[in-house]
Amino acid sequence: MTGPALTAPAPGLGTLLRLRAALVRNPKVPLPTALKFLPTLQDKDIKELARDRNVPATVQAQAKSWVLKREQASKGPAGGKNS
């Protein structure tokens, strides 16, 4: 028994994610608000923000930091057992 909630995301969720991404990219949005929304974005949006030079420098730096942390976490612990 699979209902609509199990097969499709909540209505309006895509719109909400696009809205948050647009707000983070907007240079007129207050910096604390943009930084608050940053962790709620999808990975692809954060990677785009890390490369985008049209966003505030603080937002770009936080996005780069987040991308680096995700990449390091996906590689596993550094050094291994033979270090």
Image: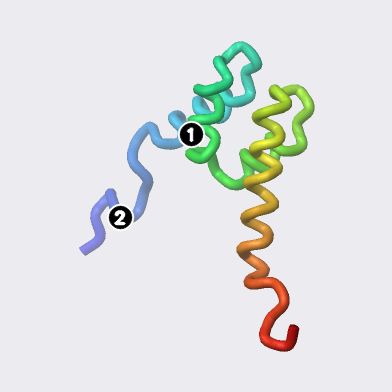
Location of residue 38 (image quadrant) = top right
- In the image: residue 5, left or right of residue 50: left
Residue lying at 63% horizontally and 24% vertically, measured from the top left: 25
Which label belongs to residue 17? 1
List x then y, in percent, for residue 70.
Answer: 62, 55
Residue lying at 34% horizontally and 36% vertically, measured from the top left: 11
5 shown above or below 54: below
Q: Judge by depth and name the residue closer to the eye, 30 or 15.
A: 30
Residue lying at 78% horizontally and 27% vertically, measured from the top left: 53
Residue receiving disc 2: 6
Q: Judge by depth and name the residue closer to the eye, 73 or 44.
A: 73
Rendered-image quadrant of the N terminus: bottom left
Q: Are marks 2 and 1 in contact (CB under 8 Å)?
A: no
Q: Earlier in the sequence, mark 2 or mark 1?
A: 2
Q: Judge by depth and name the residue closer to the eye, 73 or 82.
A: 82
Which label belongs to residue 5? none
40 shown above or below 59: below
Rendered-image quadrant of the C terminus: bottom right
Residue lying at 34% horizontally and 54% vertically, measured from the top left: 7
63 shown above or below 67: above
List x then y, in percent, for residue 47.
Answer: 68, 43
Q: Residues within 10 Å of mark 2 (few under 14, many from 20)?
A: few
